[in-house]
Image: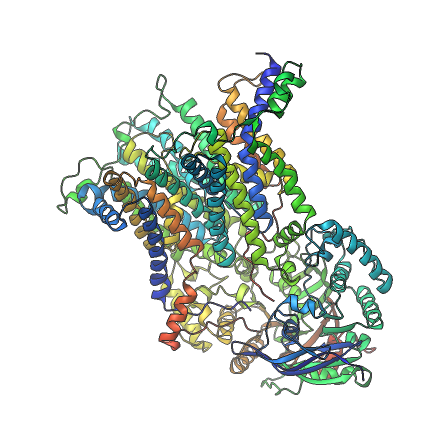
Amino acid sequence: MAKAAIELVGINKSFGPVHANRDINLEVAKGSIHGIVGENGAGKSTLMSILYGFYQADSGEIRVGGKPASIRSSNDAIAAGIGMVHQHFMLVDNFTVLENVILGAESNALLNSSIAKARSELLRLEREYGLQVNPDALVEELPVGLQQRVEILKALYRGAEILILDEPTGVLTPAEADHLFRILKQLKEQGKTVVLITHKLREIMAVTDTVSVMRQGTVVATRETARTTVEELAELMVGRRVLLRVQKDAATPGEVKLSVRNLVVKDSRGVTMVNDVSFDVRAGEIVGIAGVAGNGQSELLEAIAGIRHAVSGSVLLDGKPLDTTGPADPAKLRKRGLAHVPEDRHHVGLVLAFEENENSILGYHGQPRYRKGPLLDVSEILADAKDKIEKYDIRPPNPRLKTANFSGGNQQKIVLAREMEQDPTVLVVGQPTRGVDVGAIEFIHRRLIAMRDAGKAVLLVSVELDEIRALSDRILVMFDGRIVGERGPDASEAELGLLMAGIEQKETVA
Amino acid sequence: MSAPYAKLPAWVDYGLIPLINLAVAFIVAGLVVLLVGENPFRAAAILVEGAFGRGQGIAFTLYYATTFIFSGLSVAVAFHCGLFNIGGEGQGYIAGLGIAIACLALDSILPWWALFPIAIAAAALFGALWALIPAWLQAKRGSHIVITTIMFNFIAASVMVYMLVDVIKPPGSMAPQTRLFLEGAQLPRLNWLIEMFGLGRIRSAPFNISFILALAMAWLVWLLIWRTRLGYEMRTYGFSPKAARYAGISETRIIIVAMMISGALAGMMALNPTMGDQHNVALDFVSGAGFVGIAVALMGRSHPVGIILAALLFGMLYQGGAELSFEMPNISRDMIVIIQGLVILFAGALEHMFRPAIQTLFASFSPRSVGMTEGKGA
Amino acid sequence: MDVFNIVIQTLDSTIRLSVPLLLACLAGLYSERSGIFDIGLEGKMLAGAFASAAAASVFHSAWLGLGMGILISVGLALVHGFASITHRGNQIVSGVAINFIAAGSTIILGQAWFQQGGRTPALAPSERFEAITFPGATALREVPVLGPIYAELISGHSLLVYVAFLAVPFTWWVLFRTRFGLRLRAVGENPAAVDTAGISVEWLRYRAVICTGVLTGIAGAYLAMVQNAGFVKDMTAGKGFIALAALIFAKWKPVNAMFACLLFGFLDALSIRLQGSPLPFIGRVPAQFMQALPYVLTVVLLAGFIGKAIPPKAGGVPYVKER
């Protein structure tokens, strides 16, 4: 057996009441590629941040190369030979590649010698690992794949023996990702140790030697990649959770209320996030969009809700087209009967500094019923808020309380109450139960079913596969900006998991 | 995972912490007094006595406070929309031009009660227009509003020098100012109001009717911010531009409208020293009152009631400071500028400095009263 | 007086008038390049002017004056750092506060200590930085064209003038050729990159604001000990803000900063020279127009109508370590 490059022994880390890492034991063999998979929030990033000195573990021990290491800052990590490629690159955009590489690793107070040294060192790294990049190019002018290469070069320049990559392919095209994997294998051959954090099983299968699965803050299993299957890993990742069962009858879909045609959406960097997506949602059905976070669901949702422009394609509400490419206008959409529960309730769906009653009219604050002459009708707004509080069992039942003081579940209920009580034709919901306690989850699910039964067209986006399966009448799976398959509500978890992982199946017909 | 501040009772948040910040500002000011070799306690006594001791002092205090209520409200309205309008000084100065035009044209024709509304409108309009350009540039071109409003202060100063020296100055006069306004453009004094309370006869204090206007504006600002759709939208944008976007609030519109209201309020502050006191529009008549508004708004936590209280405090400092400089020649009225700076520093830039300590203190007394607000859910 | 002489004299006063702008502008450059906005240049310059004049007249030493000016200015810079780096306060608010504190305390302390209505005692020539005459300047004065240029423009300035202009290549060198400069530029663009590279963001930014304090201190000393012979209240008269405008105009680059300050200094010199006299073709230009021009140009630039001034990306945002 190869010697261990890193050993983690009994690592614990809590943020307030959240136990992000629970008694973690992990061993990474020297000269191997070790994968760590898990869903969002499983604690992967926290663990790696502890390893890189961003956080200190509450308890436990880190050993590097067999010796106990005290890693209290990035400096300690670098000194211990650990390099990290962050999900969001830690590069200075208007610096050249060389400048970025030497930043923090300069040999003395003047730059000349550092730059000369880095230049020859980069040439060596290029020869050894095929890490080609123009040292004098400005980082902001490089494509994302090359920027990532600069991050890897930074780590190697600092003499990293252990390289941690956090979700490295999130921003890469498949071709770039393949290239990255070749580089990682080359690094391994040169004796480096690589830790690859990802939620994409395809990548695990493609490059790793061993893989650890994390779930809810713990390492639930470690396997040799050659001796495991995607199915087993998917099951370990998701776990045998208490199945969410929601009482519901078969849907009776009516006419098409929302239809999306060939929608293309790009993010602020110009990366295509939604790629030629088309689907319909009928009255009286819930259409769920499943997918691993970051595959374009958020952008799709925002484009439909009018918060983000689309590049091309169209959205039809009740048969009539919306102006998607022009400056979107959520206010107009609301008037036409589209309600939107956004994914990020803290920054988008609510103003946390507002009183509860103020949030219960957000977006509908212009309605005549909340107005008295030129002023807002405060007593009507309060009465209306009280009404919703009662109906949705929001606690504490105080409409004058600051919204920040409600629990996550109750905050979400404030948003849901506001959007559902407008009696919309179409309800677009993103991550309805993220950060919500179990009791509230059940309540929210019942409400969504009730909306369906009342003949609303509901579009549900969630990264919780259970939720999608429990609620949806039809399931669309999104991967890499596209809808890669449609399944019925009885589709198995494993089947959906494979689709979500981007693994093609012959019988897939959208 | 930014840890939210632990929750403290409202009276600590809105009462104790601002008071501690204010106290520290005054303690440091006291040290300056000590440094110039005077007794800070005696200085404070003279200051308070000068401001409130006699009717005359009170009238002056209220006269100064009037201007500061306007400028404080101006800064606060922009604050509520998440904007820092540092250009109140220039907006007020330019408003003097509007007032001059209205008064010079109409003071021989109209009585004060007919001219006053016209002058208010002119002042508000000129102030609002001077704020419009920075607002538009912020909304449409993304130029930093703090920098543009500073630049506009200087541009306003140049414009006003040019207008007063080359355009408006009566022929033959040396002083860069308008002619004296006739009776139609002189606002009635309110000194009788103070005399009514038996505080002695007031000789010549310029306390005038624009004080009532300032109070009315404070009430209107309260109404605007907390009782109208526009105010609701401004606050939404101020707290979270993303939520505003979600709620269908136009970013361009809300920035421009908020800045114009802010500019209009800054403009109205010009009424008090011109029509209320000097009865002309002269060079540099604003003399820093626009900047005092920053301190007033920060101290008053952008709430009209707080602003009125803070404006009274600064009115007291201005009036009491004048008295103080008679008694202690070493302490001129510029002492107030220091206090103003210290208040801005401690109530503004360092407002959270004492918070952790106070939280620890509260937690040790009654652990249950200090609940953590809900963290960002995973 | 012939045209040539007028040109030489205007350029000479351009140099003199741009020196305080240049020093303050370079001061702002260090701070803003590190991601700390500083609208308190004015206040620090004013405090530096007062402290240097006061110390020079008390200790009868120009050098002690300069040292005290720098010391006090750095002290205020540290206050700004304490508020905006350590306590992550609003950098604009902090800058405004420092301007007021400086404006008020220079007058109060001046009056209390010297009893001359806020002025400091007039400085004797030995208490100031006097003009340095370069070798041969007097002899060469009579040489046509080059003579006056050498004698008037190049020679005959105070030490601090040369310091200011040498500070330009020096700042360029620091920024682009030293480790400190590399890190300084990095921290203003992406503090997280600096942090993950194992460098303290706070200490780096503190060093930047100290540089700012040193330079505003020298700028103040120049005003009080070279341009004038003592401190007069409010003697900076908005120069700190013009310097800020110049900094934006220069797009936060040292050599550009020099040209921007020379341009603004030239406008100032021109408006002094033109007072009342008409320009050919244009007619009489109001002096106020010239005075407002730097601000107008800055606004136009900020609006992106003539090139875009893109400030350091992390400017004005307190760094919170977050993942």
Residue at 55 percent across and 34 percent down: it is: C160
Residue A305 in picture, x, y percent from top left = 60, 63
Residue at 31 percent across and 47 percent down: it is: B33
Q: Quadrant of residue A370?
A: bottom left
Of the 4 image quadrants, the one containing the C terminus of chain A is bottom right
Residue B366 in picture, x, y percent from top left = 36, 76
Residue B342 in picture, x, y percent from top left = 38, 50
Give whichever of A79, B76 is nearer the camera: A79
**Above or below, A346 relative to B172:** below
Give whichever of A243, A75 is nearer the camera: A75
**Above or below, C252 relative to B155:** below
Residue A278 in picture, x, y percent from top left = 72, 66
Give whichever of B125, A489 is nearer the camera: B125
**Above or below, A459 relative to B18:** below
Give whichever of B245, A85 is nearer the camera: A85
**Above or below, B13 relative to B272:** below
Residue at 47 percent across and 53 percent down: it is: B81
Residue furthest top in the image: C1
Q: How many numbered marks, from 0 up?
A: 0
Instruction: Judge whether residue C307 can be spotted in this image.
Output: no
Of the 4 image quadrants, the one containing the N terminus of chain A is bottom right
* Display colour scheme: rainbow
Q: Quadrant of residue C120?
A: top left
Q: Is residue B170 left or right of residue A63?
A: left
Instruction: Judge whether residue C20 can be spotted in this image.
Output: yes
